[in-house]
């Protein structure tokens, strides 16, 4: 309870920033729109009555409210200072002479490229795979599943994003207004709408394209890694363009706990159990 109280106090403090308020307001509007669409198409909204959705709400409040950033930002700042001190030549600010729209476009491409390979690593590297399994634990997708991210993965994402920022330089102020757009796009990608972008599917990640990635089938699970652009998957041979959404989602065989605290502990306990099994086997 003390952890939850600490987190809630952090959220209340962060809500003084307009960006947090705007993010929550935008998600609320999106929620109402999606509920209306899903009710029209399906006639039921049972996914929003499940305990899984309440868990997703906890993740969303912690991330949008800024509590996760309390851990991420000191780590990123420490690495940034270390790089500036020991490898200042990396700060080349390659975008500074380009027009602002081109700066933004190249920065987005670089960040999405790094996140594509980070995402693949999260599916392959032992330890990281357990951390990322939390995001795949949802057996019913909803628009807040986008925020079901383990704290360690959130820190890793911040570190990975630092790489293009170091080499290219941060884009101008026009980057910040796009923050809300990314939140909404990521939420829509994780909604349960069977939405495809047609010919643009080979460029941008649609809800149907990303839903395949959340399938309980291993061949689907190891595909469609792109966050914003799907052409990385096309280029590197990991794209699957399905005719519809998967029948089932999640990783039911892992028996991942349904609560936030249980999921916070799960990667560590899973790695320890595997290490103990390996040790007893070798003994």
Image (tube, rainbow, N blue to C red):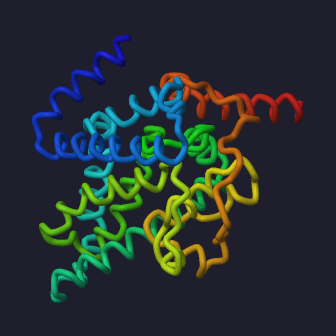
- Vertical comparison of 271 with 91: above or below: above
- Viewport quadrant of the C terminus: top right
Inspect this view and state whether residue 152 appears: no
Q: Position of residue 89 (x, y in %)?
A: 27, 77
- Say above or below: 56 vs 88: above
Residue at left offset 68%, top offset 59%: 222
The residue lying toward the viewer, choosing from 227 and 167, is 227
Q: Quadrant of residue 252?
A: top right
Which residue is located at x 23 percent, y 27 percent?
A: 10
If the image is split into quadrants, where does the N terminus sit? Answer: top left
- Residue drawn at x 38%, y 76% as measured from the top left: 109
Q: Is residue 212 above or below residue 232?
A: above
Residue 256 falls left or right of residue 217: left
**How far across and how far down the image is residue 174, in percent?**
15, 69
| Residue 109 appears left or right of 180 | right
Residue 247, horizontal then vertical, whole percent: 71, 48
Q: Where is 176 relative to 19, above or below?
A: below
Q: Is residue 157 left or right of residue 121?
A: left
Foreground residue, 124 or 99?
A: 99
The residue at the point 33 percent across, 62 percent down is: 162
Residue 117 appearing in the image: yes
Residue 280 position by quadrant? top right
Furthest-top residue in this view: 1
Q: Quadrant of residue 63?
A: top left
User: Exactly how many numbered labels are in the figure?
Assistant: 0
């Amino acid at each position: 309870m003390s952890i939850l109280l600490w987190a809630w106090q952090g959220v209340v403090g962060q809500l003084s920033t307009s960006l947090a308020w705007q993010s929550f307001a935008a998600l609320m509007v999106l929620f109402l729109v999606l509920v209306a669409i899903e009710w029209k198409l399906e006639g039921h909204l049972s996914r929003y009555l499940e305990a899984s959705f309440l868990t997703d709400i906890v993740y969303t409040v912690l991330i949008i409210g800024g509590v996760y950033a309390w851990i991420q930002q000191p780590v990123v700042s420490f690495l940034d200072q270390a790089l500036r001190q020991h490898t200042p030549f990396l700060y080349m600010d390659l975008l500074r002479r380009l027009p602002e729209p081109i700066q933004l476009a190249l920065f987005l491409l670089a960040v999405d490229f790094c996140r594509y390979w980070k995402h693949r690593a999260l599916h392959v590297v032992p330890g990281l795979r357990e951390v990322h399994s939390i995001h795949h634990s949802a057996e019913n997708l909803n628009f807040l599943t986008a925020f079901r991210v383990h704290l360690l993965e959130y820190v890793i994402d911040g570190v990975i994003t630092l790489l293009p920022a170091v080499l290219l330089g941060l884009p101008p102020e026009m980057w910040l207004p796009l923050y809300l757009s990314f939140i909404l796009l990521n939420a829509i990608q994780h909604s349960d709408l069977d939405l495809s972008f047609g010919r643009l599917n080979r460029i941008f990640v649609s809800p149907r394209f990303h839903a395949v990635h959340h399938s309980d089938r291993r061949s689907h699970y190891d595909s469609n890694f792109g966050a914003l652009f799907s052409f990385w998957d096309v280029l590197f041979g990991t794209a699957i363009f399905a005719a519809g959404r998967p029948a089932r989602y999640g990783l039911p065989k892992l028996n991942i706990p349904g609560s936030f605290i249980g999921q916070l502990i799960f990667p560590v306990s899973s790695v320890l159990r595997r290490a103990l099994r390996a040790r007893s086997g070798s003994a």
